[in-house]
């Protein structure tokens, strides 16, 4: 159910958002738009709809003068180099419900765009009035960034302003500063996560080097983002996720391959990376299939081991768990056989040892827990 | 009640039409199955583009090609499930197989391929029912043979790539009892003999095993049938992907559910996968040349497609170049519709073939490549399935990560 320009403008009026409205012939580019409104003193915006390899969408809305480097942006979002492309035309129509040349933050009023992340140029804040298209490109509306924020918050979005020209170093010790703006795939709000296994590291979206020691990416003070796009670490056990594993494998192999081949054969990495994308698409089904077979085999082995343990030694066959810190299952007396053979890192010791392993009698007498 | 009775009335009215669709018989009139009529007759809803887009948005991934191409085309209350999912409420999937033979063909794989996609996309658990008792009742099999076939089929199902942490496979002979049986009897008490006759077409000569079977296929729709999985979660919703001929079972189930205090299951239904020789029936496991089997070698696939796949091309090259192919009856293009992932390539092939520039041989060649890859991948995965793995999938075990 796509919103019309009229409905959007009516909504802005309801919200007491101060804006001016200019009609002009249909324009498809910023230059054309400038011909009609450029003289009026406000700041023109350029708006890009980008997508990453997991088909998540981003609107990058910037002052027309701001230089947006997609490679740097991609790294800052934690998508690796070259992780961002222009989104195909269909996405404009199907997700944003706007025509070509009309990407605009206002498209987020549509329900279909709820998973699209929005990055706003912090340069907007210093301008008295900024120009955007409402949902059609025969109109330009001018409003201050505060009023834009008002609108965004009314549709449940926390505005995220970013210094789009900054190029901070992204690496092991400095995590991608915009990773919070990557849309999370899980629907938000109350997840009754009953069976949280605290031994697993909370997952982050696409941090390329998974061996970082940091558990969470801290958002920079200016950049907040609550709402549909927040990557909450609510999925505790991704160690057994086949799709993620396959992506991790590609993340290891492709950059290496790209850099080696481009050096040896003196081809530009950009030319190779589209071939590599095609190759990844082709290889993914087979890779996922063999990974699933491995996972099944590992789970089965664990299941067999668990069954044998129970049959032969009962509950005594398993090391006791600290009632305070270890697994607490709401299912109570049910014996849970959790096969945690896939752990992120480090590799598991042969038996899970706990420093506080005490024989049952001692714990009861002692009472000093 | 409402839905089942209406279907009875419609069944009687359309008796003069030639199309017959029920769980044990599918035959089309001239011109193939009329799906619009079927949807009207059954009273389910069409799955439109908006719904497909909604699924894509909710799951943050492109919709499966079966959805993009309208192969899963009908549903019941899918919208409700999506509404709830959006609010953070989960559901579980239920699908099944009647293990009547060891030979699975590609048509059997379709619902499983789609179910795997649903499991991965929505991150929800799945129960898979193997109705070995049904096959014993309907076919001339011993109990041992039915059980054996169920286990063999389980291996092919596992090879489709389901997530062992979220999947419970069970066979009726092994699992019926306890809470499951209690639900069966609750359902049975709500359905009169006349009603099952109306829905399933039983006759006075049919033995009572047949007549009392339907509840067995109905109750996996209710979470309380699986106390080791969903205990305390009586109102958890269920989504059932299936071919549209299974609709009668679930019409009955949906009628009964509110009367016994349970939620109605939702359905998402597919078209039939055409037999190699043409659109008139669904593939039959008893005619080897009507289908591509998952055990076929690359050579067998090549022969079957070249020799038996019904072509919409013209009799001579000149005529073909002039008139183009008839895509309505051409089986290779229909198969590509199901199995060729790339939308652009598919469109290109359809266009070139329809306008006579591409010949049947080329289309068939492309299909052979696609099918060979698919079958080979399945065979590799199947080879890695051990008896212990089947035991693990079928063990009555908790699934702690099932919503993770």
Image (cartoon, rainbow, N blue to C red):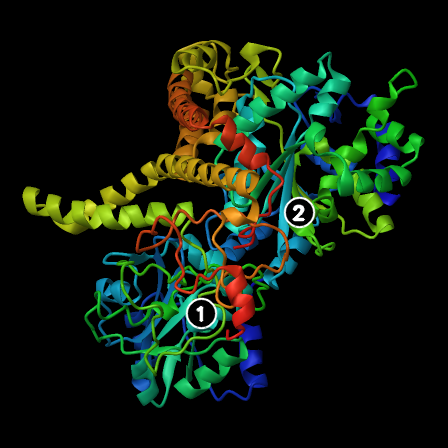
Q: Position of residue A153 (x, y in %)?
A: 50, 80
Q: Is residue B258 above or below residue A156?
A: above
Chain label for disc 1: A
Tell me the SS state at disc 1. Answer: loop
Instruction: From the viewer's side, name the closer residue of A218 and A187.
Output: A218
Q: Can you give x and y, in whole percent of width and height, for residue A142 in the image?
A: 41, 83
In this picture, is B353 found above or below A170? above
- The verdict on a common chain for dots 1 and 2 is no
Query: x%, y% of residue A305?
Result: 47, 39
Q: CA distance from mark 1 to mark 2?
A: 34 Å
Mark 1, Cα crowd under 10 Å, few <14 / some 14-19 / many 20+, is: many
Q: Taking B209 as reference, is B246 above or below it?
A: below
Disc 2 is attached to a residue of which chain?
B
- Residue at the spot x=28%, y=66% of the render? A213
Kindly identify which residue carries mark 2.
Answer: B228
- The residue at which mark 1 appears reads as A230
Q: Is residue B15 visible?
A: no
Q: In this view of the protein, which residue sits in the foreground, A366 or B389?
A: A366
The residue under the point 71% across, 13% down is B141
Image coordinates for residue A61, horizontal then vertical, percent? 35, 73
Task: Tell me the quarter of the picture where residue A27 sits.
Answer: bottom left
């Amino acid at each position: 159910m796509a919103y019309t320009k009229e409905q959007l403008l009516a909504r802005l009026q309801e919200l007491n958002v101060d804006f001016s409205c200019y009609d002009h012939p249909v324009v498809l580019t910023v230059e054309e738009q400038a011909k009609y409104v450029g003289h009026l003193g406000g700041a023109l915006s350029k708006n890009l709809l980008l997508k990453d390899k997991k088909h998540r969408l981003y609107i990058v809305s910037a002052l027309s003068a701001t230089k947006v480097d997609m490679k740097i942006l991609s790294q800052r979002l934690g998508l690796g180099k070259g992780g961002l492309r222009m989104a195909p035309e269909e996405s404009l129509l199907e997700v944003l419900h706007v025509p070509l040349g009309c990407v605009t933050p206002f498209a987020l009023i549509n329900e279909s765009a709820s998973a699209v992340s929005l990055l706003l140029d912090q340069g907007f804040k210093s301008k008295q009035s900024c120009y955007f298209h409402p949902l059609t490109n025969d109109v330009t509306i001018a409003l201050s960034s505060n009023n834009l924020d008002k609108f965004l918050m009314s549709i449940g979005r926390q505005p995220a302003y970013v210094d789009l020209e900054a190029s901070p170093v992204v690496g092991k010790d400095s995590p991608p500063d915009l990773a919070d703006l990557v849309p999370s795939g899980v629907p938000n709000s109350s997840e009754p996560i009953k069976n949280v296994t605290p031994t697993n590291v909370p997952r982050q979206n696409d941090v390329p080097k998974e061996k970082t020691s940091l558990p969470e990416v801290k958002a920079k003070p200016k950049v907040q983002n609550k709402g549909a796009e927040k990557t909450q670490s609510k999925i505790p056990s991704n160690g057994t996720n086949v799709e993620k594993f396959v992506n991790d494998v590609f993340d290891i192999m492709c950059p290496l391959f790209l850099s080696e081949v481009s050096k040896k054969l003196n081809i530009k990495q950009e030319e190779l990376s589209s071939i590599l994308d095609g190759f990844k698409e082709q290889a993914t089904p087979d890779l996922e299939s063999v990974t699933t077979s491995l996972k099944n085999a590992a789970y089965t082995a664990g299941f067999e081991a668990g069954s044998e343990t129970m049959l032969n030694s009962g509950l005594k066959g398993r090391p006791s768990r600290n009632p305070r810190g270890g697994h607490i299952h709401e299912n109570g007396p049910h014996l849970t056989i959790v096969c945690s053979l896939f752990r992120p890192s480090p590799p598991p010791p042969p038996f899970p040892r706990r420093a506080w392993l005490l024989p049952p009698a001692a714990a009861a007498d002692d009472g000093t827990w | 009640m409402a839905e089942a009775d209406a279907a009875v009335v419609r069944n009687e009215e359309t008796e003069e039409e030639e199309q017959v669709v029920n769980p044990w018989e599918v035959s089309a009139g001239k011109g193939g199955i009329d799906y619009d009529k079927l949807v009207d007759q059954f009273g389910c809803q069409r799955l439109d583009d908006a719904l497909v887009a909604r699924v894509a948005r909710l799951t943050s991934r492109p919709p499966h090609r079966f959805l993009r191409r309208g192969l899963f085309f009908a549903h019941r209350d899918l919208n409700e499930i999506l509404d709830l999912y959006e609010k953070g409420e989960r559901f579980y999937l239920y699908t099944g197989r009647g293990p009547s033979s060891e030979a699975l063909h590609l048509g059997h794989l379709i619902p499983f391929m789609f179910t795997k996609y649903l499991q991965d996309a929505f991150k929800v658990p799945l129960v898979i029912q193997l109705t070995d008792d049904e096959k014993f009742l309907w076919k001339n099999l011993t109990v041992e043979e039915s059980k054996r076939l169920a286990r063999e089929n389980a291996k092919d199902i596992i090879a489709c790539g389901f997530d062992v942490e979220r999947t419970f496979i069970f066979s009726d002979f092994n699992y019926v009892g306890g809470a499951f049986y209690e639900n069966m009897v609750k359902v049975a008490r709500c359905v009169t003999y006349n009603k099952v006759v109306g829905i399933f077409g039983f006759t006075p000569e049919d033995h009572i095993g047949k007549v009392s079977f339907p509840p067995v296929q109905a109750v996996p729709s209710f979470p309380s049938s699986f106390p080791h999985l969903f205990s305390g979660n009586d109102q958890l919703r269920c989504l059932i992907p299936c071919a549209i001929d299974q609709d009668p079972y679930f019409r009955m189930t949906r009628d009964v559910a509110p009367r016994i205090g349970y939620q109605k299951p939702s359905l998402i239904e597919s078209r039939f996968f055409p037999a190699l020789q043409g659109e008139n029936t669904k593939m039959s496991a008893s005619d080897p040349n009507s289908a591509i089997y998952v055990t076929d070698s690359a050579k067998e696939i090549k022969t079957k497609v070249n020799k038996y796949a019904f072509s919409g091309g013209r009799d001579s090259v000149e005529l073909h170049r002039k008139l183009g192919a008839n895509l309505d009856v051409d089986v290779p293009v229909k198969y590509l519709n199901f199995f060729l992932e790339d939308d652009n390539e598919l469109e290109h092939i359809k266009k070139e073939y329809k306008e006579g520039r591409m010949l049947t041989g080329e289309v068939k060649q492309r299909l052979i490549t696609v099918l060979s890859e698919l079958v080979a991948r399945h065979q590799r995965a199947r080879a890695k399935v051990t008896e212990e793995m089947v035991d693990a999938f079928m063990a009555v075990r908790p699934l702690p990560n099932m919503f993770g």
